[in-house]
Each structure stands twice: as structure tokens, then as C-alpha cells.
Amino acid sequence: MLATKMIETPDIAAERSAAYRNAMARLAAAVTIVTTDGVGGKAGFAATAVTSVSDNPPTLLVCLNRGSSAFPAVKANGVVTVNVLSNDHQNLSRLFGGKTPVDERFAGADWEKTETGAWRLPDALASFDCRITSIADGATHDVLFCEVIETVVRPDGEALVYFDRDYRVV
Amino acid sequence: MLATKMIETPDIAAERSAAYRNAMARLAAAVTIVTTDGVGGKAGFAATAVTSVSDNPPTLLVCLNRGSSAFPAVKANGVVTVNVLSNDHQNLSRLFGGKTPVDERFAGADWEKTETGAWRLPDALASFDCRITSIADGATHDVLFCEVIETVVRPDGEALVYFDRDYRVV
């Protein structure tokens, strides 16, 4: 049983969106930096909408706003590396979450080239080097299904988490 | 540019899955209980694979193992309520994460019926009452795209987070 879309006025829609964002602020999420490189150029963005999908084959998903500056590069390259941030990476997260030009973002840390050609943060808690295998429509966002071809884990270090519109440490 | 599937032996696949799970243990995630009810019956499960997709229209996604006990009910009902857990809900999370029969799971707390007919945990940090609008294939899992029709927020309370295969508080 699948629902049909609701019809509503712009005011009600805006109110519903605001209520939704307030509720989502109560869902804690790990902070990551997602990078890409290739024919579409180098890009990277901070993301909390990253989730494990399956361990066979290893698959995760990333939700990416179609209006974001990194979107064209990610789509053209078809590859991403997801880097899970530690508490030491708060400034880096801010750099990749704002309007900073690409080169300045990446200048905030040293990076290693991954097998897919994207960029790994060497001291990330974990990194997932991925090929995008399919894309689902998520209204304003594309949901990228990513097959993980290589993982690197750092066994120590505290996690950087976003909760109540602020950084927290776990 | 989309990737084709890799061909590999079972041993290599098992190793790759294990490495993936170890890396995913380093991605902190909020703990939720997802409930459903309707023609397919009452069901509920603990989930960390819940992510915001869009605020317009308010949309989230839930990854659900097709082998899970709750799967047939969720598919038949087409509705879910996502309840974000606080630190007070560790025992409830364990109850909904194991092999406990449905009635015993729900006996662990008081629940309110939502507009869709699923079940809200009144002291959840946030709850999202949803209709499933589409489903994407995530290998072993279905990825449920859910339009949020009602949110309830509890402004206080600490978040229950899963990290390094253990509960943490944020």
C-alpha cells in the first residue's frame, strides 16, 4: 500500500518542513566528509546523511542535495570516498560544510588518493572508497547507492557527532 | 559513469563483508525503534539505518533487512513510525533488536496510536509518522522512502547512540 502525494498550500508546506527540521535535529548523526575526483573534477562536502545499506555486497548510501556545489562533480565522476570524522576534525567539517572554494577546503588537511581516484583523510575513524552503482530520487536530493571497494579503519579516536544543531563527541 | 558489479570468490566476499562491518562500527548512529501496524499486523524493530532525505516534502529513509521478522508487516501496511530513542531506552532497544515475540516487545513501554495506525513512543526524542512512498533495492535490504506526515518532538533528553558495537550517550 503506497501513499499518494499530499496537496497543500505553500504556507502549510513551509511549516511542515520547519517542524521536520526541528525533529531531525534530535536524530544524532556521525559527521563525514565525502570526496570525489575524476573527469568531473575534485570536490568534497560534509555529510551526516550517510547510512549502511548492506554488507553483501558492502553498500552504503549518501544523500546529496542536487543544488550543492559538489553535485555535478559527484555525478560525473561516479565515485566517492566517505571519511568518518573524529573529534579532531571539527574545523575541517566546518570548512567542507560552508561556501569555501574547493582548493581551500582540501588545503585544511593532507589527503591520500584512493583506488577510485577520490581522496581519503588518513586519520579518519574509517574511510569507505566507493563506486556509485545506482541513484534513487529523493525529492530535493539524490540518494547515491555506493558499492564499497576498500575500507580503512582507525581503531582509536572519538567520533564527531551532530546533535541539536551542534557538534558533540562520542 | 556507473560501476559494474565485481566478480569474486565466496571467501573474498566474506572477508570484504567483515572488513566493511568493522569499518561501519566506527560510524556512530542514533538508535531508533520503527513500528508499523495495519492489515499486515503489528511489528517493530530497532534500527540505526535511518537518514533524513529531504525537508520538502519531508522525507526520510529506513533500511530494512528483507529477512527480518518485521519485513512482511511493514511491506503490507505501507506505514511506519520512527521513534528516536533517549538514553532511558537502552532496554527497550535490546528488546526490539533481538528475537523477542512482538507482544513482549511492545509490552516494554506504553505506546500511542499514530495517524497512520503505527505506534509512537511518547517519550521519544522525536517521532516521525510516515507513509512509505517508494522502495529501492539495497541488495539484502529494502530502502524505504517515507514521507513524514506528522512529527512530535521532545526538546529535552540525551540521545542514545550506537558506536563501536556498544551504546553511548550524547
Image (spheres, coloured by chain):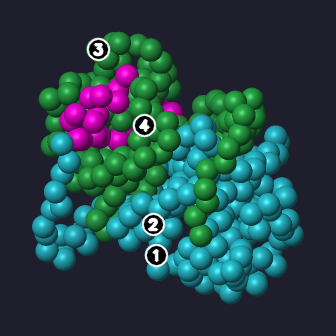
Chain colours: A green, B cyan
Q: Residues at badges 1 and 2 in contact (C-beta under 8 Å)?
A: yes
Q: Which residues are magenta?
A: A69-89
Which residue matches tag 1?
A: B66
Instruction: Name the residue carrying label 4.
Output: A64
Q: Which mark is residue A103?
A: 3
Circles 2 and 4 in contact, beta carbons < 8 Å? no
Query: Of the residues shown, which amino acid type is indicated by label 1?
Result: Arg
Inter-mark Cα distance, 4 to 1: 25 Å
- Callout 3 crowding tier (Cα within 10 Å): few <14, some 14–19, many ≥20: few
Kind of residue at badge 2: Asp
Instruction: Give the chain of mark 2.
Output: B
Look at mark 2 in the image and give the residue it sits on: B142
Q: Residues within 10 Å of mark 2 (few under 14, many from 20)?
A: many
Q: In the shown orientation, is residue A91 left or right of residue A83?
A: right
- State yes or no: discs 1 and 3 in contact (Cβ < 8 Å): no
**Which amino acid is tagged 4?**
Leu
**Local secondary structure at mark 3:** helix
Mark 3 falls within which chain? A
